[in-house]
């Protein structure tokens, strides 16, 4: 029992030191192994706006927040995707996307890739829009990863929720999408956070594909 307690204290010290720092992740946009032939439709993905609500000291880890001891601001918020925690669940350092990558660009890029995978011609310039071009815009309601401590392993959960507006030539429609993923591991390393986020992005991409087929 004493040896176990000592081990837990050492692990707590090591994880606490890492958890207090701010981490940056380089997240890859999911790509399909097999791409569908052209469906003869063009799509332009416009503004995908981050509308997440951050709280100063949320009561549960699934609510977005930032480490109050570190520099914040809109640039940091745009890249924030989680908070690290000690083995006791105490919120600590921030988990950010790498510089140059934001939640908005990551979600928009995933939507573009998903539509390309199922045969849409994705326009890259607004000037290319024609009368029959499908235009997709939307808002990000939730995009967050949180830590669930356990006695022998931890679980990371990631949630993405968006509301997309699709404007085809004759009438528009709204597509609400919410996906949740879980990832179990021995320790909450930066690579573990990245794996969890990329896993839920794949689920999100699959949902988008189903909505547009």
Image: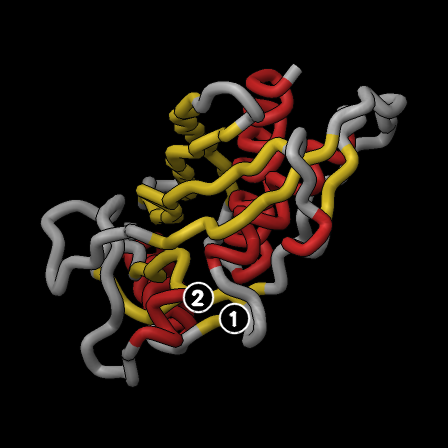
> Which quadrant of the structure image shows residue 19?
bottom left
52 w.r.t. 174: above or below: below
User: Circle 1 is placed at which residue position?
Assistant: 24
Where does residue 31 sit, x and y in percent of width and height? Answer: 76, 39
Find numbered disc 1 in the image and state the secondary structure of the residue it sits on.
strand
150 w.r.t. 32: above or below: below
Where does residue 29 sit, x and y in percent of width and height? Answer: 67, 48
> What's the residue at 32%, 45% (across, down)?
149
Q: Label 2: few (<14), some or many (≥20) within 10 Å?
A: many
- Which one is in front, 164 or 40? 40
Real-space Cα separation, disc 2 to disc 1, in angstroms: 9 Å
- Which one is in front, 29 or 157? 29
> What's the residue at 44%, 28% (across, down)?
179
Find numbered disc 2 in the image and state the secondary structure of the residue it sits on.
helix
Are the residues tagged 2 and 1 within 8 Å (C-beta)? Answer: yes
Where does residue 47 sit, x and y in percent of width and height? Answer: 48, 52
Residue 10 visible in the snapshot: no
User: Circle 2 is placed at which residue position?
Assistant: 79
Residue 171 visible in the snapshot: yes
- Whether residue 168 sits left or right of residue 40 in the image: it is left
């Amino acid at each position: 029992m004493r040896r176990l307690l000592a081990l837990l204290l050492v692990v707590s010290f090591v994880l606490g030191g890492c958890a207090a720092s701010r981490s940056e992740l380089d997240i890859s946009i999911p790509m399909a192994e097999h791409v569908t032939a052209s469906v003869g439709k063009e799509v332009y993905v416009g503004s995908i706006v981050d509308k997440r609500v951050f709280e100063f000291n949320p009561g549960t880890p699934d609510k977005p927040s930032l480490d109050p001891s570190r520099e914040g601001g809109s640039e940091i918020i745009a890249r924030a995707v989680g908070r690290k925690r000690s083995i006791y669940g105490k919120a600590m350092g921030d988990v950010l996307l790498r510089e140059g990558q934001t939640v908005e660009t990551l979600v928009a890029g995933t939507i573009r890739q998903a539509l390309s995978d199922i045969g849409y011609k994705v326009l890259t310039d607004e000037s290319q829009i024609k009368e029959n071009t499908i235009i997709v815009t939307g808002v990000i309601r939730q995009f967050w990863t949180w830590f669930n401590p356990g006695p022998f392993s931890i679980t990371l959960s990631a949630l993405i929720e968006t509301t997309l507006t699709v404007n085809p030539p004759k009438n528009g429609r709204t597509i609400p999408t919410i996906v949740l993923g879980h990832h179990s591991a021995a320790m909450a390393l930066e690579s573990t956070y990245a794996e969890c986020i990329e896993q839920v992005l794949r689920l999100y991409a699959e949902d988008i594909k189903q909505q547009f087929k």
